[in-house]
Image (cartoon, rainbow, N blue to C red):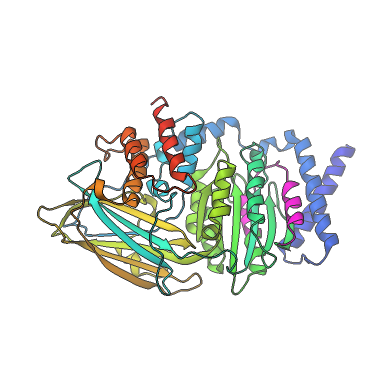
């Protein structure tokens, strides 16, 4: 009885403190209040761990987790079909710099299983890799690259390769950052590949921050709370101590946590800086905003505040890939799946500015194909990023973002009429906005046919085709013809290039690993 009374007392004290935080009355200058919040939060979580039987009814059962995985494997994910240019000449889509589908599939393959076809998003495989596109000139935030050559899985067709390259940013000269870490500490995060890996990942980010950057930390389990008020990036010991003291236990109030994180970000918003919420979770929002629709509505409302979002996924088993992607897509954000420390270094080390600093938002691509030259065309991937033709000029229509130094690649497979050498395949158009802008700007240029053979094309062209082919093999795509994993390996090896960080080398190892798995 004493134990239960003590638990109840701590619970109501903690909820009272969390209420103060939610109402915006927490004073960052008061070390006493800050310490009390941290202490009471830690006590509450310890009691949650001790009273697992009392909260077990709030957690999904193992059977329900298994059902979710089975549903995900059975989910139908249709590929973009070939379209007749004479009937539908225009293709419009939002760009996508996410790469979580590739790393999530990689983790499953490395664990000895084949990923479900529904998990494979071709554009996220392609965009995991950097390509040597030229830097933009003048005041443009990104450059445009294009190349045309024969298709390796159907030589009579052509591939149209389109690349956008974001302007590089020196981390030492970047704008100051107001970052809010939103960390899932629910019971489902106990696995080694979840909260422990999450902590190591955030440590890499914290070490890259400067004294003018501000970091806040919100956690959520049965309730959401502020455990670290805005703190200078120079005070790394305090930030890391708070991070490393986090423990997992309880159910998942994801919606409540998101609201509080946005509230903290807005309260401390930098007028001329980078304002971003970084959410780290396995996506298992099973309390509060539990449906994808409710979560999407919340995110769409909050993005109007000018706060960007980065979504980090961890773990397997009950991992909710679709929910994590929805948050990023609808919240002016990017999405990464972290399966090891090396991937964390890629996201927060070598790719830090691209991950955290947006240089162009609501970026849309539209290609109007020339029916006199093009019979049919098909966009590889971007199935859940497709837009209507009229959405291209609608500045109210949300689209994707490009981070500093990021590249974005899109590939069309086209079937041409005969005798169309050097003819105009179509017109390429792009619209984008400045990070805080509301009116879009237009870039356009022609796409011309090219007689070069696939073997004569650039490393960019060949390697991206190999990666796209790998995704099609994993999906057992009906469009891959007789293209096989051995073809992927052959082309990938021939177009590996310099590969400074061995990302392409690791890709080739992954293909070899996939070849060894039972089909």
Question: For the point 16% across and 60% down, which residue is it?
Answer: 422
In the displayed structure, 514 sits above or below 187; it is above
Q: Nearer the viewer, residue 309 or 236?
A: 236
Residue occupying the point 26% across, 47% down: 81
Decide: is 436 above or below 71: below
> Which residue is drawn at the image coordinates 84% and 39% (left, top)?
4
Corner quadrant of residue 439: bottom left
The span shown in magenta is: 234-260
User: As rendered, which of 1 and 450 lies closer to the eye?
Assistant: 450
- Image coordinates of residue 304 in percent, x first then y, are 53, 67
Quadrant of the rendered image containing residue 475: top left
Which residue in the rendered view is the most extreme toward the left?
A: 419
* Res. 350 image quadrant: bottom right
**145 to the left or right of 87:** right
With 160 as the anchor, is 211 left or right in this view?
right
Left or right of 346: which side holds 247? Answer: right
- Assign the N terminus to one quadrant of the image: top right
- Asked if the magenta segment contains residue 278, the reply would be no
Query: Relative to 450, is 267 on the left or the right?
Result: right
Q: Position of residue 253 (x, y in %)?
A: 64, 49
Image quadrant for the C terminus? top left
Which of 220 and 243 lies nearest the eye of the viewer?
Answer: 243
> Eyeballing the image, is 505 above or below 309?
above
Q: How many marks?
A: 0
- The x and y percentages for residue 352 are 56, 57
Residue 283 seen in the current view: no
Asked if residue 236 lies in the magenta stretch, the reply is yes
């Amino acid at each position: 009885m004493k134990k239960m009374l003590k638990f109840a007392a701590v619970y109501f004290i903690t909820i009272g403190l969390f209420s103060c935080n939610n109402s915006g009355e927490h004073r960052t200058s008061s070390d006493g209040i800050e310490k009390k919040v941290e202490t009471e939060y830690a006590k509450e979580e310890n009691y949650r761990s001790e009273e697992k039987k009392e909260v077990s009814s709030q957690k999904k059962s193992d059977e329900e987790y298994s059902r979710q995985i089975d549903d995900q494997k059975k989910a139908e994910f249709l590929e973009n079909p070939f379209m007749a240019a004479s009937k539908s000449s225009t293709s419009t889509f939002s760009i996508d710099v996410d790469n979580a589908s590739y790393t999530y599939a990689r983790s499953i393959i490395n664990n000895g299983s084949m990923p479900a076809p529904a998990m494979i998003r071709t554009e996220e495989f392609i965009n995991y890799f950097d390509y040597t596109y030229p830097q933009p000139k003048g005041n443009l935030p990104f450059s445009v690259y294009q190349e045309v050559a024969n298709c390796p899985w159907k030589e009579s067709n052509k591939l149209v390769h389109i690349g956008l390259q974001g302007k590089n940013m020196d981390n030492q000269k970047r704008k100051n950052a107001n970052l809010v870490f939103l960390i899932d500490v629910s019971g489902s995060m106990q696995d080694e590949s979840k909260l422990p890996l999450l902590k190591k990942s955030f440590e890499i980010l914290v070490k890259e921050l400067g004294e003018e950057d501000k970091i806040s930390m919100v956690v959520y389990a049965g309730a959401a709370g502020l455990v670290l008020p805005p703190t200078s990036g120079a005070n790394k010991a305090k930030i890391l101590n708070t991070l490393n003291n986090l423990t997992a236990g309880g159910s998942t109030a994801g919606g409540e946590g998101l609201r509080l994180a946005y509230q903290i970000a807005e309260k401390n918003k930098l007028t001329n800086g980078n304002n971003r919420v970084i959410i780290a979770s396995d996506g298992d929002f099973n309390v509060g905003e539990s449906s994808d629709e409710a979560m999407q509505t919340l995110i769409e409302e909050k993005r109007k505040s000018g706060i960007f979002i980065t979504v980090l996924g961890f773990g397997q088993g009950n991992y909710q890939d679709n929910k994590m992607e929805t948050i990023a897509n609808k919240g002016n954000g990017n999405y990464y799946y972290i399966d090891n420390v090396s991937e964390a270094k890629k996201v927060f080390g070598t790719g830090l500015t691209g991950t955290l600093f947006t240089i162009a938002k609501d970026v849309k691509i539209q290609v109007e194909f020339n029916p006199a030259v093009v019979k049919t065309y098909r966009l590889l991937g971007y199935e859940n990023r497709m837009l209507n033709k009229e959405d291209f000029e609608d500045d109210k229509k949300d689209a994707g973002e490009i981070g500093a130094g990021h590249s974005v690649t899109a590939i069309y497979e086209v079937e041409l009429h005969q005798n169309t050498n050097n003819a105009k395949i179509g017109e390429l158009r792009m619209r984008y906005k400045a990070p805080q802008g509301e009116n879009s700007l237009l870039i356009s240029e022609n796409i011309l046919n090219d007689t070069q053979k696939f073997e004569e094309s650039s490393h960019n062209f060949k390697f991206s085709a190999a990666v796209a082919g790998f995704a099609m093999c994993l999906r057992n795509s009906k469009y891959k013809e007789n293209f096989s994993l051995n073809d992927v390996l052959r082309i990938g090896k021939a177009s590996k290039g310099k590969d400074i960080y061995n990302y392409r080398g690791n890709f080739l190892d992954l293909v070899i690993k996939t070849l060894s798995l039972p089909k």
